[in-house]
Image: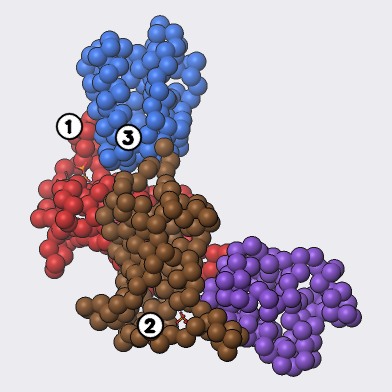
Chain colours: A red, B brown, C purple, D blue
Amino acid sequence: MSASKPPADAGPVRMSLSSRFENIEMAQHLCGKLLEGREVSEETKHWILMALREALANAIKHGNEQDLDKRVHVEMRVDQNTLEVRIRDEGSGFDPERVSDPLAPENRLKTSGRGIFYMKTFMDDVRFGRHEGGGMEIVLTKHLNASRE
Amino acid sequence: MSASKPPADAGPVRMSLSSRFENIEMAQHLCGKLLEGREVSEETKHWILMALREALANAIKHGNEQDLDKRVHVEMRVDQNTLEVRIRDEGSGFDPERVSDPLAPENRLKTSGRGIFYMKTFMDDVRFGRHEGGGMEIVLTKHLNASRE
Amino acid sequence: MKTSVREVRGVSILDLKGKITIGSGDVQLRETINKLVEDGKKNILINMKEVTTIDSSGIGELVGCYTSVTNKGGKLKLLHLPPKISDVLTVTQLITVFDVYEAEPEAVTSYGG
Amino acid sequence: MKTSVREVRGVSILDLKGKITIGSGDVQLRETINKLVEDGKKNILINMKEVTTIDSSGIGELVGCYTSVTNKGGKLKLLHLPPKISDVLTVTQLITVFDVYEAEPEAVTSYGG
Ligand SMILES: Nc1ncnc2c1ncn2[C@@H]1O[C@H](COP(=O)(O)OP(=O)(O)O)[C@@H](O)[C@H]1O
Ligand SMILES: Nc1ncnc2c1ncn2[C@@H]1O[C@H](COP(=O)(O)OP(=O)(O)O)[C@@H](O)[C@H]1O
């Protein structure tokens, strides 16, 4: 009735947003809807949305540098109980190998540098790549029913 | 606090969906989020989302003929308290002049033909056009604070 | 959408729950009504109390059901119409087509059984 | 985010409400703490009870506040940490950095005022 069970795969949902932090919630909201009726606990959903927030914040801040002429592109899909979210910006990219470890003693009290670490903690897989259309693309993956901690 | 007031215009939000009726709710959900914190009654919001549902159903059914290789493109924005939603399909289009009137006595008991009429009833403006990229584009407009019936 | 049928004093009451929208509930409504008609039911009352959403496809199916029941010499009436669905029927001038009731006993009695 | 400050037996209690996230609440937190420090406050307790969401920017600001209060010879402690925020501090090994309390009287007393 109210929440009709989504099909195994309703195809990818794509969205794009202008580079404002206020828009982070739009993408989170849509991702929450995509997870509706899926085998995923509220707890897991919370962490997925936090990882998504971090990726979007980076795309807006570091990637697009809050340039309102640049957009953030998001593609989400659930297929065979795996959520995949791709976040792409229109910035000049970065080398993920060179990101410092926030747990290293000298970084522990820094005021930044934890976003990617949180993504990796809360998702099953985080991949970085350059998109053919330019910009950085981050792919977040989470296996849904496996992750009910 | 919880619902942070959105800015006057956070830029257009664009999304695209594969041609499944199940996806209608994704777009409705996002539009609902876009209206959050705006000067719009629950009542008005309900009718906006119904009009959006009708436009999406037409794009999926008549436009893309449920072809899963074709997508429905939606662009939404609120600017100066006016909501504008553009719904574009990848179909071959139609002539809106030739749509029959569902209130005509001979059509009153037909099992179809009310979608566009509902859009026009619930929105302030409904415009039809052909998109440069092919397909039909419908533009739904609603003035938000004027419409608290 | 969920459907279930009760028989009350010669009237088949169809309780609907959820959405009657394109691809979800619209065809189901038609099939349920068709089955009742095939089973020879003539007095059909649709209880809309728990219908949460309807769209033009759902309205179209409702009209289609009305026509097929009427064509078989039966009567299709509506019970507990939520205000927004009533509005949707009103603007397309369908509200006068249907007999609409707000109380079940009254609705059942109206069939003159 | 909404902030308000109360003084309880020599301790400035900062009640936070809402989100401490990038572009909304993160800078505000820093500014509020800076003002307390400028006003010569040394005993600062942040009540996190009604913080609904935090992200890495919010965590970063919290750490920054901790450092600037400590550098001025003050003490910044946390009260009523919601479980999910506690988790977020834990995985980045920050939970041991902060003194965290579950009851306000106990927290206030801890400053030894
Ligand atoms: N989309 C991006 N485009 C460019 N640089 C990025 C992007 N995402 C992350 N980075 C780089 O990686 C660094 C670490 O990111 P993160 O772990 O999220 O911490 P923070 O954002 O707090 O610096 C950033 O400081 C930035 O230099
Ligand atoms: N996006 C579209 N692409 C092609 N044809 C369309 C589209 N939208 C509407 N139409 C045409 O307009 C007609 C009327 O649409 P509508 O009023 O929504 O009623 P219904 O969908 O029930 O037929 C449709 O039957 C169809 O022929």
Name the mark on residue A106.
1
A34 is higher (above) or lower (below) than C63: above
Local SS, label 3: loop
Q: Chain of mark 3?
A: D
Local SS, label 2: helix
Residue at 27 percent across and 61 percent down: it is A16
Q: Nearer the viewer, residue B112 or A115?
A: B112
The residue pinned by badge 3 equals: D25
> Can you tell which quarter of the image residue D79 is in?
top left
D63 is higher (above) or lower (below) than B134: above
Left or right: residue A134 compared with residue C85: left
* Residue B53 in sight from this viewpoint: no
> Can you tell which quarter of the image residue C81 is in?
bottom right
Say which amino acid is labelled 2: Pro
Task: Indicate the quadrant containing the N terminus of chain A: top left, top right, bottom left or bottom right.
Answer: bottom right
Name the mark on residue B48.
none
Residue at 21 percent across and 40 percent down: it is A113
Q: Nearer the viewer, residue D8 or B39?
A: B39
Left or right: residue B11 compared with residue B6: left
Q: Position of residue C69 (x, y in %)?
A: 72, 88
- The answer to whether mark 3 is within 8 Å of ligand 1 is no
